Image (spheres, rainbow, N blue to C red):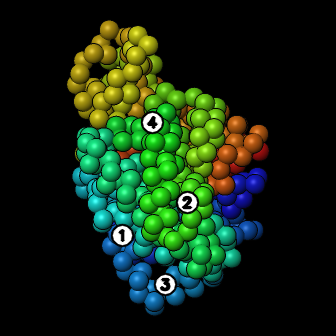
Amino acid sequence: MKAGSTELTYCTNIHPGESWEEVRANLGRYVPQVKRRVASDQSFGIGLRLSAAAAEALRDEDARFEFLRFLRDEGLYVSTLNGFPYGTFHGARVKEGVYLPDWREDARLDYTNLLADLFAGWLSEAGRPSGCISTVPGAFKPNASTTDDLGRIVERLIRHAAHLVAIERDRGCRIVLGLEPEPCCLLETVEETVRFFRDHLHSAAAASRLAELTGIDADASSRALRRHLGVCLDLCHAAVEFEDPAACFAALEHAGVEIAKIQVTAGLLVDPVSEAAVAALRGFEDAIYLHQVVERRDGKLRRYADLGLAMDSGVWRDGRSEWRIHFHVPVFVDALESFSSTQSFVREALRLHRDRPRSSQLEVETYTWSVLPPQHRALPIDEAIARELDWVRGVLE
């Protein structure tokens, strides 16, 4: 649906389901309910998450046809894809495994190419000229520590760009892959992300390699890399890294890196960290997802790969620490038990976007719904999603 000049949706990774049968059942159960609450008089885009297994199942022509019929009947279309989690994402330990296979491996490339092929069909069917697929930020940082690791990641990203060039040539739709910076990953901060694009994806060597793969000349290859490789800016991740919204937008724009999608998400903010706050945070600790913590202390940043590690460190006991925590909470929530959310960061980013749009796609993504403490998920899930979307529209308007 439209929010001003921008596409606004939510990511269906909030609904547990790995097989296509499970995904399709959830789409039928929840998406029409959300649409009726927020966009009853207009078509509604789906932010679709497909596991590798679900994507493979959609190679079947009958399954794709049935899905298209569902979209037409319900006034829906696919507006963006989440290609970040490859495998199981609910109900079992995910943690740092969410990045695997990463961009060092052909399995990640093959999966993302398949998503692009499927997406091209849905874009064409809906008469839409472009769309974005979000993906992992290269790799979990400990898994991308060598020159060989980095070279393998860059090579597979260029090979995917070649696939997207062919899709645009043959099918007339532009797909952008959005690398999603995240704490403790190869692409963590906006500064690191800009440097990675400058030194690798926007380099003369990358353009030469893409020209070799596609047969287009070096100048066209350079443009194609910028046309098909960008970022998915997750506002929770950026806030956790103590970024500044205006500086994020300015740095990416100056570097010529497209913001293919903005994920409208909020994390946790604890300032100062206290015994009471840590006691309340115990309710947010879970065995499924990775909840990275960035601590600001005496003007310096320290990172913990998970919430439990930060709490167990004990460094915070003198009351001089501020924490930002990668735990997605509903964007309409500001105050929690003994701390707050990073909602103010979201508000500022949306205000800047309202004044001058920075991306064509906004996507609410509170995938942690099932592990939120019970008092924060009392609403029916379709009502909570609709409330998030309405909150975003309210800020934009």
The numbered mark, 2 or 4, whose residue comes first in the sequence reads 4
User: In 3D space, how far apart are the residues under numbered discs 3 and 1 (Cα atoms)?
Assistant: 19 Å
Nearer to us in this view, 122 or 336: 122
User: In 3D space, how far apart are the residues under numbered discs 3 and 4 (Cα atoms)?
Assistant: 39 Å
Report if residue 179 is visible in the image: no
User: Badge 3: few (under 14), some or many (20 or more) residues near its Cα, within 10 Å?
Assistant: some
Question: Which amino acid, mark 2?
Answer: Ala
Residue at which label 2 appears: 218
Q: Do residues under tags 4 and 1 come within 8 Å of each other at their CB atoms?
A: no
**Could you say which disc has been placed on residue 110 in the image?**
1
Question: Which amino acid, mark 1?
Answer: Asp
Question: Which amino acid, mark 3?
Answer: Arg
User: Badge 4: few (under 14), some or many (20 or more) residues near its Cα, within 10 Å?
Assistant: few
The numbered mark, 4 or 1, whose residue comes first in the sequence reads 1
Q: Residue at x 24, y 18 (%)?
A: 314
Residue at which label 4 appears: 192
The numbered mark, 2 or 3, whose residue comes first in the sequence reads 3
Q: Position of residue 151 (x, y in %)?
A: 33, 51
Q: Position of residue 223 (x, y in %)?
A: 60, 57
Q: Position of residue 22 (x, y in %)?
A: 38, 73
User: In 3D space, how far apart are the residues under numbered discs 4 and 1 (Cα atoms)?
Assistant: 26 Å
Residue at which label 3 appears: 64
